[in-house]
Amino acid sequence: MLFFSYFKDLVGKEVTVELKNDLAIRGTLHSVDQYLNIKLENTRVVDQDKYPHMVLVVGFMMHSNSIWDWD
């Protein structure tokens, strides 16, 4: 619960999340649950030159009201 409490204190602040594939996404922490699942708002890719294809995906997901069906 120590990590959960730490992240709960960061809600509403800008954070950077680095994924296992070195992709870093920066945004405002909207919420976090006890499993440390996070939700970010106003996201952007940190290194746009390294991941130019993700700039469009993150931007589309931010401005889309679509329901994603991955099947």
Image (cartoon, rainbow, N blue to C red):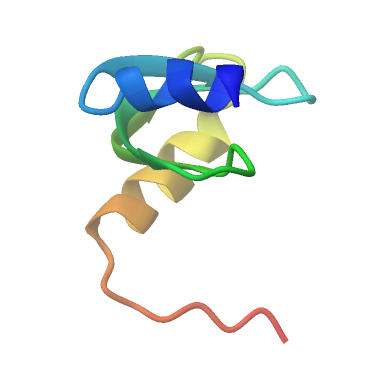
| Residue 19 appears in view | yes
Query: In the picture provided, is 27 more to the left or to the right than 24?
Result: left
Image x and y of residue 49, in percent: 52, 14
Residue 35's x, y, as percent? 64, 44
Return the x and y of residue 44 as percentages of the image width and height: 36, 28
| Quarter of the view holding residue 12 | top left
The reply, left or right, for residue 61 in relation to residue 4 is left
| The one of 30 and 49 positioned closer to us in this rendering | 30
The residue sitting at 43% across, 35% down in the picture is: 55
The x, y position of residue 27, in whole percent, is 33, 26
As drawn, 14 above or below 61? above
Rendered view: 15 above or below 31: above
> Between 40 and 46, which is closer to the camera in this rendering?
40
Q: Nearer the viewer, residue 30 or 42?
A: 30
Q: Quadrant of the N terminus?
A: top right
Where the C terminus falls, by quadrant?
Answer: bottom right
Looking at the image, the residue that sits furthest to the front is 1
Residue found at x 38% / y 56%: 61
Q: Is the residue 10 above or below the residue 1 in the image?
A: above
Does residue 45 show up?
no
Question: What's the residue at 23%, 57% (across, down)?
Answer: 63
